[in-house]
């Protein structure tokens, strides 16, 4: 009997490995400015903009794979504000990651984003991205924001739009 339990437990563990592997997503995000004029958002990022999210810094990031797309944007006159690539785990519920670019001022950054992935059945993205400008005292004087929720097709490049900002995001399994 103990051998039977061991074999069943090994088989169940082996069968669950693909499910665990399905919970890791490769995420790459490019945030860019579409025009020269900054359009302020109705609500700048709150002081606790990354609340409930795992903050990713340089140690969590990977080499970028969308360099060709970033180069095309630059050659067309767009300004790249953030280009980062990371692995984000999602195991049946949502997983929030916070990324940023530039020097922080009072825990706010020139560019900051919270990427929330959920995969109950399909993969969903809830993205909140801010581009902030600071005054001489380090307070946010203007802020632009992209806030979108959409169903994601893994492997496909998705475009998020705002009047003066844009973002490209690709999520692979």
Image: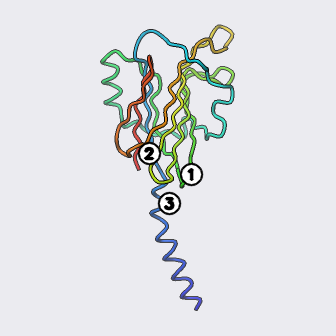
Which residue matches tag 3? 20
Query: Which residue is painted at 41% across and 35% down in the image?
Result: 169
- x, y percent for residue 35: 40, 13
Residue 135 is situated, as x and y percent measured from the top left of the image, at: 63, 9
Residues under labels 2 and 3: Cα distance?
A: 14 Å
x and y percentages locating residue 5 in the rendered image: 57, 84
User: Which is more N-terminal, label 3 or label 2?
Assistant: 3
The reply, left or right, for residue 33 in relation to residue 105 is left
- Identify the residue shown where x is 38% and y is 35%: 158
- Could you tell which of marks 1 and 3 lies nearer the N-terminus? 3
The chosen color scheme is rainbow
Considering the numbered disc 3 on the image, is that residue within a helix, a strand or a loop?
Answer: helix
Q: Secondary structure at mark 2?
A: strand
* Left or right, residue 46 beside residue 85: right
Q: CA distance from mark 1 to mark 3?
A: 13 Å
Label 1 – label 2 distance at C-alpha: 17 Å
Tell me where residue 26 appears, x and y as whole percent: 44, 45
Q: Nearer the viewer, residue 121 or 74?
A: 121
Res 75 → quadrant: top left
Q: Which residue is mark 2?
A: 26
Q: Residue at x 58, y 92 (%)?
A: 1
Q: Which of 157 and 121 lies nearest the eye of the viewer? A: 121
Marks 1,3: beta carbons within 8 A: no
Foreground mark, 1 or 3, reads: 1
In the rendered view, tell whether residue 10 sits above or below residue 137: below
SS state under label 1? loop
Q: Which residue is mark 1?
A: 93
Q: Is residue 132 above or below residue 115?
A: above
Within the image, what quadrant is residue 44 found in? Answer: top right
């Amino acid at each position: 009997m103990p051998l039977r339990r061991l074999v069943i437990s090994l088989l169940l563990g082996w069968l669950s490995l693909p499910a665990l592997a399905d919970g890791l997503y490769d995420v790459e995000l490019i945030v860019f400015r579409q025009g020269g004029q900054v359009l302020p958002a109705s609500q700048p990022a709150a002081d606790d903009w990354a609340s409930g999210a795992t903050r990713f810094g340089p140690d969590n990031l990977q080499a970028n794979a969308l360099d060709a797309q970033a180069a095309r944007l630059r050659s067309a006159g767009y300004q790249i504000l953030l280009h980062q690539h990371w692995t984000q785990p999602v195991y049946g519920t949502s997983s929030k990651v916070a990324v940023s670019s530039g020097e922080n001022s009072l825990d706010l950054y020139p560019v900051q984003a919270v990427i929330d992935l959920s995969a109950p059945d399909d993969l969903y993205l809830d993205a909140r991205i801010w581009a902030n400008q600071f005054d001489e005292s380090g307070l946010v004087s203007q802020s632009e924001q992209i806030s979108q929720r959409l169903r994601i097709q893994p492997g496909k490049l998705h475009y998020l739009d705002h009047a003066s900002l844009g973002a490209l995001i690709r999520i692979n399994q």
